[in-house]
Image: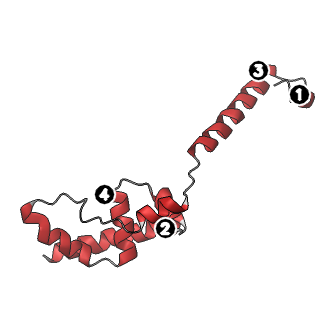
Amino acid sequence: MLESIGTYREQNFVAYLVTIAKNLAYNEYKRRTRIVYTDTDLDLIAPFSYESQLEIKAGNEAIIKKALSVLDEVEKSVFLLHNVSDLPHREIALALDKPIGTITWLYSRAVKKIRAAIKED
């Protein structure tokens, strides 16, 4: 507040302080939620085998393999990163270096393909 006292126009001082506090809190929140991926982080994502992470009950193995087989590699990566690894679409977009809109579209398309494949069986 003291740094910006020169910009204060004699109006509502409490509102002035609240605005400064709100903006500082928002800036701090943005700083803390910023995600930075290093080259080593991306190297760990690429060779990861999702099949080892899936918990498959004996009777469902064929259905799950059939459902995943209808997806191309990018769709499968997006679907499994979101559902198995619990990554939000924003982090998947950063990891795969694609726009978030593309990731949400790929995920939606993957879900539709899986639903269609399961309905066929």
Q: Residues within 10 Å of mark 3 (few under 14, many from 20)?
A: few
Looking at the rendered image, the quarter that the N terminus falls into is top right
x then y, percent, for residue 77: 37, 69
Is 38 on the left-hand or right-hand side of 88? right
Q: Report which residue position mark 1 lands on.
A: 8
Q: Residue at x 18, y 68 (%)?
A: 64
Q: Label 4 is placed on what type of residue?
A: Val
In the rendered structure, which disc, 2 or 4, sits on the residue that comes first in sequence?
4
In the rendered structure, which disc, 3 or 1, sits on the residue that comes first in sequence?
1
The span from disc 1 to disc 4 (Cα, nearest Å) is 52 Å
Q: Report which residue position mark 3 lands on.
A: 14
Is 63 on the left-hand or right-hand side of 114? left
Residue 85: quarter of image: bottom left
Q: Label 1 is placed on what type of residue?
A: Tyr
Q: Secondary structure at mark 1?
A: loop
Q: Cβ–Cβ below 8 Å for labels 3 and 1?
A: no
Q: Report which residue position mark 2 lands on.
A: 96
Q: Residues within 10 Å of mark 1 (few under 14, many from 20)?
A: few
Q: Label 2 is placed on what type of residue?
A: Leu
Q: Nearer the viewer, mark 1 or mark 4?
A: 4
Foreground residue, 118 or 51? 51
